[in-house]
Image (tube, rainbow, N blue to C red):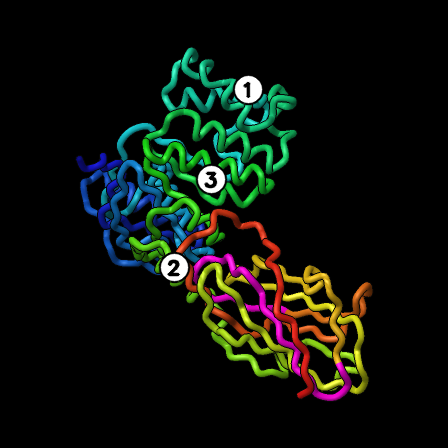
Amino acid sequence: MEKDLLIKVEGVSKKFCKDLRTSLRYGLRDLTGEVLGKPASMELRPKEFWAVKDVNFELRRGECLGLIGKNGAGKTTLLKLLNGLIKPDHGRIEMRGRIGALIALGAGFNPILTGRENIYVNGSVLGLSKVEITSRLEEIIEFSELSEFIDMPVQSYSSGMTVRLGFAIATAMDPDVLILDEVLAVGDASFRHKCYHRINKIMKDCAVILVSHNMSQITAVSSAVGMMRAGRFEHFSNVVDGVSAYDSDNADKEALSDAERVFTTYAPVRTAKLIVRNETVAYGEKLDVELHTDLEAALPGVRLSFTAVNANEQSVMNWNSSRSGKPMDLPAGRSILRFSIAPVLLHDGRYRWNLWVGREGSIEVLIYYMRGGEFHVQSGYQPVSDIPYLPDSSGFTVEAG
């Protein structure tokens, strides 16, 4: 049996004006035209632009659409259209069932009311009776972990506390459609994991739209991806393909020379170069790395730190040679230090690396690569965490060059 169709978007477009005074004038004209039954024009007037243009997609019960794209691409505008906060200029939106939405930090909260009172207000907006809200009250408070603060005014809450309460309310009211805009970007790691678990639990009974710039969050819960580019919408039924498109759009297209990549080196280091041997690595496999150096004098007790950085400039993998339990000595002259980093537990995409080399037990810097080269991960299995992890190291060898 085919799952219920809960969201249907057909040719939806929305334009805005960059100038307030001009916008008010256009708004008056459009309102007059609407009263007279004249259809809105698809032509842009001076100072107007398309925030959302000709968007089409469907979402059924049990599906989660990860909505991604650069800042200003139209994601939040699309969510406001779906939630009925603004009206499309063209097109049609069908939303079926109860809608739970958290599209702005603190949206829908009265800052003067307490957390408990805001639960009742939000529940009433969703159409629940006082008895129904009361039956869910303890579950909401327990999930938000705010029992000590639930009778304090919301205006005294931190951003993390506000998100906890908002997410708990939006997901506990048995919504048919759940819309979340960057809500998992705030809060500690343990609460984000609770959110992942809650979304996966309720997703079989509702349709979810999740907006995030964190691709680990998208791959953790999404069944499909919608990519926004300058108001245009592209649908990817394969999550990995959508994430790869996002990474490609956000990748630094400029080629960097070795001179630009080496941020600094200090004596006795004359020259240094790091090479990632396998530019493409499968999920769970090892990354083979070589550090070529030319030293004026031998360096005993050297420590290395290798960091993988995603398209959002977030550190997602941190490797340190001290975890191997053995110090490394580099001889004078030319030499090659070979080592492996394993396992690589990153979602499909391209990653830049940074490298720091110093002395064991000291903060002295010898080599620092900033915005180094890239490597590509081919991931058949998607990790469920966006927390940087610490892989092991193995296979250390040093040989004269």
- Where is the N terminus found, in terms of image quarters? top left
Choose top left, top right, bottom left or bottom right for residue 49: bottom left
Residue sitting nearer the eye, 64 or 104: 64
**Left or right: residue 337 compared with residue 52:** right
Specify whether residue 246 is in view. no
Amino acid at dot 2? Lys
According to the picture, the residue beneath numbered tag 2 turns out to be 47
In reply to whether residue 34 is colored magenta, the answer given is: no
Secondary structure under the numbered disc 3 in the rendered image: helix
Residue sitting nearer the eye, 397 or 17: 397
Up the image or down, 351 lies above or below 34; here it is below
Mark 2 or 1: in front is: 1
According to the picture, the residue beneath numbered tag 1 turns out to be 116
Q: Which residues are magenta?
A: 331-354
According to the picture, the residue beneath numbered tag 3 turns out to be 196
- Where is the C terminus found, in terms of image quarters? bottom right
Q: Spatial distance from mark 3 to mark 1, Cα to Cα?
A: 24 Å
Q: Position of residue 396 (x, y in %)?
A: 65, 71
Mark 3 or 1: in front is: 3
